[in-house]
Amino acid sequence: MKTFEFFNNMQAPRCVSFSNRVYKLWLFIFVFISVFLVLSYGEETRNDNNVTNIGVIIDADSRIGREEKTALEVSVRSFNNSVSNNHKLSLYIQNSKRDPLLAATAAEKLIKEKQVQLIIGLETWEEAALVADIGSRARVPVLTFAAPAIAPPLATSRWPYLITMANGDYQQMKCIAGLVNSFNWKRVIVIYEDNAFGGDSGKLSLLSETLRDVGSEIEYRLVLPPFSSLPNPSEVVQEELMKLFNHQSRVFVVLQSSLPMTIYLFEKAKKIGLVGRDSAWIVTDTISSYLDSFNSSVISYMEGTLGIKAYYSEDSDLYKTFYPQFRRTFRIENPEEDNFQPSINALRAYDSIGTIKQAMERLRSEENNPNALFKNILLSNFNGLSGKIHFDEGKLSHDPILRIVNVVGKKYKELDFWLPGTGFSRNIVKQNGTGYVGDSISAGFTGTVTWPGDSKLVPKGWAMPTSMNQMIIGVPARTAFEKFVKVEDGKYPGVKNYGGFCIELFYEVLSVLDYALPFQFDPHNGTYDELVHKVYNKTYDAAIGDITILARRTDYVEFTQPYAVSGLSMIVPVKPEGSAWMFLKPFTTEMWLVTGAILMYTMFIVWFLEHQSNPEFKGPWNNQIGTALWFTFSSLFFAHRERLYSNLTRVVVVVWLFVVLILNSSYTASLTSMLTVQRLEPNVTDIEWLKRANVKIGCDGDSFVRNYLEEVLEFKSYNIENVSSEYNYEGEFESNKIAAAFLEQPYGKVFLSHYCKKFTTSSPTHTFGGLGFVFQKGSPIARDFSRAILRLSEDGTLKSLEEKWFAPSPDCSANITDSSKTDSLSIHSFWGLFVISGVTSTICLLLFVAHLMNKYWHHQEENNVGNLSPVDDSVWIKAVRVVKFLYNGEVCVQGELSAGPRAPDIDEWSSSRWDYDQSPASINMENLEVTSQAEAENEIQLQIQTN
């Protein structure tokens, strides 16, 4: 016991010393760790001030989301590894699965827990709108990769912290409309997957507007339910697609669809035959962006599809640096993928970090806050991978260049470009500082497309008839004029025989078409408006017959090129035309007046040229006028016998006789035609008289004419009688039940070709669009028929058919109302003849006057030389002397009893060939006249001297 106590006493000091050493060691370690932690915390606090936290909200499960994630990581890594940069970026990624509610929850979590200064991502506008509300309240900027199809009103006021890195859909919808117009498709079917909010993001209204601008329209829209809500998507998609067989259009435009829905959509469409030779598919960039992620089997379902993608250049240095980094990182993170090509979505994600880089470079250290960051982002101005990055009111200021792609085989090929404000172009050229321009602008799409079924021919875009699904064509069974359309019972029950001009024209058109058109006729017992409506409601695929093209009908159906003109003609009874003044009708009033005027002028010229030297034109004034009148009028019948002394008179008379010959021949021919051809005049010529007289009129009750008479011409309904057949009109007129009949112009011609002796027609005063065939709105067959009708018209086939079916009866001419009417001859046919006569007479008159004046002046000079004291006569005396000389051919001078020669030189102005021997009596009479004239002259001279 003692030994033990001793032992304890001996060991106690050692134990105490060892414990103190251990305690000191632990104390040292604790202090060291504390100091290290304090220093580490201080360094961490200092570094946190140089790190910007960025929240990322994407669909991480999709190919697009994975591309965006890789592009963001590559861009952030490049920024953080920069030696000259002392600032860092930190990404916090959240998966929204394209669900707007999950995106909103993720945004709140990032703002509250991670203290992010910026949120980027958001692949749909629905996500962006909700997150933008949260960001605006928290004053956190939001950069979205989506944009609304139509910019909301007051967007900057509603979401002041929202920035969109994508463009709207307007240019894309214009591009689709341009494609539709280039291929002459008039109707399209729109397909889109419904989103969580039950809408199409405004794309449908944009597409409808742009299609109207090019004359096309949306026939039907197929709305697919959200893929996530379908328990059995395969059956649902196929069931929805089967509805499209109830519509004729085979041009399908897919506006929006998720990746799995797109796969099911094209797989089922291919299976049921909607992806075929007569169909065309167009997809927007939403679906085109999936092409790089689809495998070969899915691509084969989309064969021939046209897609639209945002264009970006792969030739820039920035892209050449980005591409290998993206490819390497994406391959490592997604080894299951086969394609490592970045899409436009990845490029936008990379550029979003670029805007942040530029904004942070402009920030000062004391301004590192979300509000300052947002303002500097809006100042971004650089060329990124996705294009020009420059913002205006929170959205990109430029419109994108689009590229049309064509799915061929297991890949797709790139075709034309779409330039905003310009249109399609085969190529584009980059201009310094101004972007890209087209070097071969064209009005329409010019690329070579491989269509479904590996076809190079442009699809009709329409459900073409087949032997199993024939085209149903309605034919009017009740027609007033059977020469146009006639439907008869065949040899067997239920079989109809179809004939007439319209039916034969239809077969001629079929022979011109470059494709077969299986069809069957169906007789329609009803009005023409009802027949047109059956085409509109798709009871019939088309209607063939004498159907008038009216403006109101074109709103519902498509008409072909008219094969006959149409207008409203009034048919009335006729009576023979007779008049006591018929002999005046060969010439118009103006013609008679001008003929009389030229006759009187010729009479004056003959008298003036002859009265000085020709005894037959001398004597008292009444004798001179009578002789001149008698000579001129008798020349009309070549019965004149007066002798002509002057050669100038003979020239005038020769030209005048030629005029008379032409006028006599024309007058005789015209009058003979008027008297020998029966001329008929209508009993009624005025529509207004029919309404005032309150008489009854007739028309075809099955046509539109009855309504036209009531609504436009304002006839009373009880005054309009329906006449069912062309053969009933004659009886209606003879029984005085109707005073006039109103028929369309083609019917009027047919009617008059058999009843030209009893009826006549007025010229059409109300014209219509003509007669044509009817097809459903937007049908390409109508366009082919129009082209065929024009070809038949040009090669004379249409004219031959008209002559065959509408040949007149033996007693009539096809144009009876025109050929039986002989128009009066007008001055326009003879003005040249009158000018020749007038000019000839005037020239002869001037020559004669000039010769007389020359004689007069010579005589005056001789008298002045012989007279030593010449008398200065007044102007009046000189004028009287000249006039007397022109009238008598002689002049008296003071101091002389006789003047110079009484008449012009006979040897110069007369011809001896027409002279004849004069009797003494005539010579005495001539001397007597000369003596009396001399005495009168002497008396005048004496009076002048006395005064």
Image: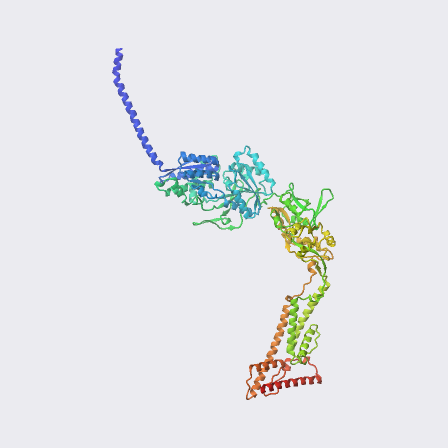
Q: How many numbered circles does the render carry?
A: 0
Relative vertical location of residue 300 with respect to residue 751 in this rendering, above or below: above
404 on left or right of 8:
right
The x and y percentages for residue 519 are 66, 44
The x and y percentages for residue 600 are 65, 73
Q: Quadrant of the N terminus?
A: top left
Q: Residue furthest top?
A: 1
The x and y percentages for residue 40 are 33, 32
Residue nearest the observer in this picture, 495 or 133: 133
Relative vertical location of residue 261 with respect to residue 844 in this rendering, above or below: above
Relative vertical location of residue 117 with respect to residue 745 in this rendering, above or below: above
644 on left or right of 400:
right
Is residue 592 visible in the rendered image? The answer is yes
Is residue 699 visible in the rendered image? The answer is no
For image coordinates 25% across by 15% down, the residue present is 9
Residue nearest the observer in this picture, 301 or 865: 865
Residue nearest the observer in this picture, 899 or 22: 899
Way the structure is coloured = rainbow
Q: Quadrant of the C terminus?
A: bottom right
498 on left or right of 99:
right
The x and y percentages for residue 50 are 36, 38
Residue nearest the observer in this picture, 176 or 315: 176
